Image: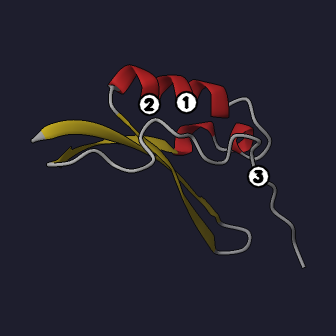
Amino acid sequence: MKTYYRLYHFYFRKTRDHFNFKKIGIYDSIEKADAAKQMLQQQEGFEEYPDGFHIIKVLRFSPPKLLNKTFWETGFFTYTC
């Protein structure tokens, strides 16, 4: 069994009672997960919620298909109706 590190981002907007959760990626080292976190903290949307990143240790028998692939690389935006 091998250890992997999954990076998530979530935040809650009290003004709209809005909870948002994003799976960013899964990495084969804590350093790669932290590097993705550092990069994304500068992107649109993520910069408003820099404390929303969480790295969770995951144990798996086989490697994930999208190992070391970072999603949401250009950030995100929210809009109000």
| Of pointers 1 and 3, the one earlier in the residue sequence | 1
Camera-nearest residue between 28 and 22: 28
On screen, residue 61 versus residue 58, left or right, reads left
Q: Residues within 10 Å of mark 1 (few under 14, many from 20)?
A: many
Regarding mark 3 in the picture, which secondary structure is present there? loop
Amino acid beneath label 3: Phe
| Residue of label 2 | 33
Mark 3 and mark 2: span between their CA atoms? 19 Å
Identify the residue at the far left of this view: 1
Camera-nearest residue between 69 and 18: 69
On screen, residue 33 versus residue 47, left or right, reads left
Residue at image position (86%, 67%) is: 79
Identify the residue at the far bottom of this view: 81
Picture coordinates of residue 19, whole percent (x, y): 58, 68
**Quadrant of image for the C terminus:** bottom right
Picture coordinates of residue 10, whole percent (x, y): 54, 55
Regarding mark 1 in the picture, which secondary structure is present there? helix
Picture coordinates of residue 12, whole percent (x, y): 59, 62
Residue at image position (14%, 49%) is: 61
Q: Is residue 28 above or below residue 17?
A: above
Camera-nearest residue between 46 and 32: 32
Rendered image: mark on residue 76:
3
On screen, residue 14 versus residue 11, left or right, reads right
Identify the image quadrant of residue 43. top right
Amino acid beneath label 2: Ala
| Residue of label 1 | 36
